[in-house]
């Protein structure tokens, strides 16, 4: 496995990035890997490496660079829902990446990925978790000719009352889409999933949307308390299937 730490230049700062690809000779389809709200750490580094081992060149940027450099949370931090200090940390991270910033940032991440040696100069994929699930749709809408596949796992705020709600961006998207939803997810309710799926059917693009039985919000990331290994393995298989079908 080839590993490299990068510095990504953006108009309002520099983001750390991690780039992974197989050691094999040749070029590999590119994927932008977006972390959950807690940012880059060993758990999602392992996820990105595992994806690269399936034959992809993977860039994982610190999408919360405006908040600060890694690590994004204090030493020993454990998120406790409703606990004031935990909620304050989460709110600060939410503010570090707005919906308006996601499309432009995403284009720079794709640019950076395609500049790396060993990356196929063709369409790329993007995957997001939790908070960044919505970013995958915003990136696909803003960069439709370069993003051929986008996946969201337990993604939140895919349907909102805002004029730029991700589900309203579907007409701008050409990518094949995959959504793996959690159960009892406050960030996207069962009713909002129904709205999303109705919009997807009206869109007439290629998509799959499913709710993972017994899997709570955050289930696919190994260091989360709700990690569900069985469903996480299924999610990984679905992700590889999506990228194999669209990028190779």
Image (spheres, rainbow, N blue to C red):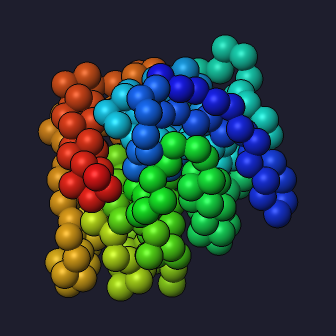
- Tally of numbered discs: 0
Residue at the image point whose x is 50% and y is 48% from the top: 119
Q: Is residue 17 toward the left or the right of residue 156 in the image?
A: right
Residue located farthest toward the right when viewing the structure as drawn: 12
Based on the displayed image, in which of its 4 quarters is residue 228 positioned?
top left
Say whether residue 33 is visible.
no
Say whether residue 228 is left or right of residue 230: right
Identified at 21% across, 55% down, the residue is 245
Q: Nearer the viewer, residue 158 or 143?
A: 143
Q: Position of residue 43 (x, y in %)?
A: 49, 23
Q: Quadrant of residue 12?
A: bottom right
Q: In which quadrant of the rendered view does residue 3 lie? A: top right
Q: Seen in the image, is 20 located left or right of residue 126?
A: right
Above or below, 193 relative to 13? below
Q: Give the vertical position of 105 relative to 116 (above or below).
A: below
Does residue 168 lie above or below 177 as drawn? Answer: below
Does 142 appear above or below 147? below
Q: Residue at x 31, y 33 (%)?
A: 54
Of residues 49 and 191, the one drawn nearer to the viewer in this rendering: 49
Residue under the image location 72 percent in, 16 percent down:
75
Confirm whether residue 141 shows in the render. yes
Q: Position of residue 48 (x, y in %)?
A: 45, 33
Q: Position of residue 184 (x, y in %)?
A: 28, 45
| Residue 101 place in picture, x, y as percent | 67, 66
Residue at the farthest front position? 25
């Amino acid at each position: 496995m080839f590993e490299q730490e990068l510095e990504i230049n953006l108009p309002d700062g520099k983001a750390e990035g991690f780039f992974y690809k197989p050691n094999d000779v040749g070029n590999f389809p590119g994927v932008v890997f977006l972390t959950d709200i807690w940012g880059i750490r060993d758990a999602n580094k392992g996820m990105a490496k595992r994806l690269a081992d399936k034959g992809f060149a993977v860039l994982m940027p610190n999408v919360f660079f405006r908040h600060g450099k890694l690590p994004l949370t204090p030493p020993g931090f454990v998120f406790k829902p409703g606990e004031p200090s935990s909620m304050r940390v989460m709110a600060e991270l939410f503010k570090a990446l707005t919906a308006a910033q996601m499309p432009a940032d995403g284009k720079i991440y794709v640019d950076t990925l395609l500049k790396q040696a060993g990356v196929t100069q063709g369409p790329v994929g993007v995957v997001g978790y939790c908070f960044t699930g919505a970013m995958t749709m915003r990136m696909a809408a803003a960069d439709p000719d370069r993003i051929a596949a986008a996946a969201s796992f337990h993604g939140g705020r895919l349907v909102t009352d805002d004029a730029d709600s991700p589900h309203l961006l579907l007409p701008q998207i050409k990518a094949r889409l995959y959504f793996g939803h959690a159960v009892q997810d406050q960030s996207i309710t069962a009713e909002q999933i129904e709205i999303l799926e109705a919009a997807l059917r009206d869109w007439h693009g290629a998509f799959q949307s499913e709710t993972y039985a017994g899997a709570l919000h955050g289930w696919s990331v190994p260091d989360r308390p709700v990690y569900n290994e069985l469903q996480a393995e299924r999610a990984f298989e679905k992700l590889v299937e999506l990228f194999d079908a669209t990028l190779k």
